[in-house]
Image (spheres, helix red, strand yellow):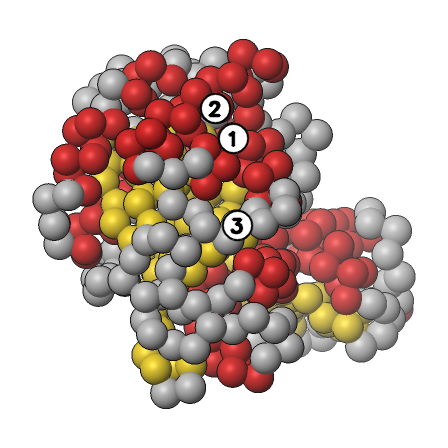
């Protein structure tokens, strides 16, 4: 997908470099430098083996006054620094210390994120050796659009394209900008997959308000996509607010002036989440799964995830086979309330099953033609209530096996 043209966002600069975490020549680290007073919020993986950078960010953002003056973010690709014990934590601390020295701030005001191979200790000396180059690039006054594109490329692992999004809104008549980048292609089933997302706005918003907004929108964006059902040790979504727009500062969660901003933030996050699915490893189909008539929102979400995560459903889609029996399987295995005798299934506008049985109007030729489309909608009504949920996924192809079979070699 084309990377958007992102205009200047006051209070943030970015620079990428090659630290050497990959054998081939490519940028694999990026540094964001923020204006004084930039606020920050974060949502992270709930994986039981969280990475050292995840631990670092969670600890400092949750501390008293955390997120009130974040000055930098350093991201590296090619090494997850997860499952590396105390040595990994020490490497993360040293990295933050080196960045803090460069930018004249405290270690706690430097956020960290890593992605790559699990179980490999981060060689922080490689990062330290490139910080002078990064600082010089930050001071060079380069085009902001180029900065965002380079940052998007530097954080990629198996991604096939950099992922970016941009939106504008107004707070009391003042234009506010929101931009973000994300990476992720496999190990995607965020539970907040190797998924990273970094969003910056020039609005002035207090950390607790940022945290509340991020928490609300993560659920229906990043936590509503899945490529393979696997959650990473390193999932990180950070939201920064530089305050450079001149818009009034928002310090209360329920402030009505946040309405347009909240909608614009959701737009950016959903766009990035969809791009993760579109770039799923080996994917050829973009699939929207909607469950209606569920007993509760949680039940609807669980049912939709079961369908979207099912290897049998996903391989059928890869083969362009409208095998709705596999959808029935994925629904029934969840133990969620389902009225079997009123269950209905549609692929796009075509009804496959209704009232718990094959549709009398089922047309195999029309259904097969629909399944050849690059974008597929699957809708299931479980007839047990009024709740609904939507999850986005992709198909599962032979290419997925090839990519992950060769991931380390």
Q: Earlier in the sequence, mark 2 or mark 1?
A: 1
The answer to the question of whether label 3 and label 2 lie on touching residues, with beta carbons closer than 8 A, is no
Name the residue tied to disc 3.
Answer: 67
Q: Earlier in the sequence, mark 3 or mark 2?
A: 3
Mark 3 residue crowding within 10 angstroms, few (<14) / some (14–19) / many (20+): many
Percent x, y for residue 278?
41, 51
The disc at residue 92 is: 2
Alpha carbons under labels 3 and 2: distance apart:
18 Å
Mark 2 touching mark 1, by CB under 8 A? yes
Q: Secondary structure at mark 3?
A: loop
Mark closest to the chain's N terminus, 3 or 1: 1
Camera-side mark, 3 or 1: 3
Is 271 positioned to the left or the right of 210 in the image?
A: left
Residue nearest the observer in this picture, 194 or 314: 194
Residue 175 figure quarter: bottom left
Distance from Cα at disc 3 to Cα at disc 1: 15 Å
Q: Nearer the viewer, mark 3 or mark 2?
A: 3
Q: What SS does tag 1 mark? A: helix
C-alpha gap between disc 2 and disc 1: 6 Å
- Give coordinates of residue 85: x percent, y percent: 60, 14
Q: Pointer 1: what residue?
A: 53
Give the residue displayed 38% in from the left and 65% down from the top: 243
- Classify mark 2: helix, strand or loop: helix
Which residue shows up at 23% across the image and 40% down it?
A: 15
Q: On the image, which quarter does residue 377 sit in?
A: bottom right
In percent of the image, x 25 and y 18: which residue is there?
A: 129
Question: How far across and how far down the image is residue 143, in percent?
Answer: 13, 54
């Amino acid at each position: 997908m084309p990377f958007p043209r992102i205009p200047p966002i006051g209070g943030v600069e970015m620079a990428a470099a090659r630290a050497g975490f990959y054998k081939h020549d490519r940028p694999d680290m990026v540094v964001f430098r923020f204006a004084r007073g930039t606020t920050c919020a974060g949502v992270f993986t709930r994986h039981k083996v969280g990475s050292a950078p995840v631990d670092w960010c969670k600890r400092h953002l949750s501390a008293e006054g955390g997120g009130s003056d974040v000055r930098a973010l350093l991201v590296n690709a090619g090494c997850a620094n997860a499952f590396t014990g105390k040595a990994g934590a020490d490497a993360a601390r040293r990295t933050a210390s080196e960045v803090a020295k460069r930018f004249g701030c405290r270690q706690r005001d430097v956020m960290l994120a890593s992605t790559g191979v699990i179980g490999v200790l981060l060689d922080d000396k490689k990062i330290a050796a490139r910080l002078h180059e990064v600082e010089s690039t930050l001071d060079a006054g380069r085009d902001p659009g180029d900065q965002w594109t380079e940052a998007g490329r530097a954080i990629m692992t198996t991604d096939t394209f950099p992922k970016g999004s941009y939106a504008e809104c107004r707070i009391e008549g003042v234009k506010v900008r929101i931009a973000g980048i994300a990476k992720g292609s496999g190990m995607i089933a965020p539970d907040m997959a190797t998924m990273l997302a970094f969003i910056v706005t020039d609005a002035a918003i207090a950390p607790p308000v940022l945290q509340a907004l991020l928490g609300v929108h993560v659920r229906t964006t990043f936590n509503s996509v899945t490529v393979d059902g696997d959650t990473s040790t390193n999932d990180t979504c950070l939201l920064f607010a530089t305050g450079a727009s001149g818009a009034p500062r928002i310090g209360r969660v329920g402030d009505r002036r946040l309405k347009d901003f909240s909608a614009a933030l959701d737009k950016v996050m959903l766009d990035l989440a969809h791009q993760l699915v579109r770039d799923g490893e080996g994917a050829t189909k973009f699939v929207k799964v909607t469950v209606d008539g569920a007993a509760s929102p949680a039940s609807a979400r669980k049912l939709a995830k079961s369908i979207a995560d099912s290897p049998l459903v996903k391989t059928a889609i890869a083969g362009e086979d409208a095998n709705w029996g596999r959808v029935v399987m994925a629904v029934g295995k969840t133990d969620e309330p389902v009225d079997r005798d009123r269950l209905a299934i549609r692929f796009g506008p075509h009804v496959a099953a209704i009232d718990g049985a094959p549709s009398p109007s089922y047309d195999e030729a029309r259904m097969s033609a629909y399944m050849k489309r690059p974008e597929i909608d699957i809708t299931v009504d479980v007839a047990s209530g009024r709740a609904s949920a939507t999850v986005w996924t992709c198909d599962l192809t032979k290419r997925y096996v090839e990519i992950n079979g060769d991931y380390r070699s």
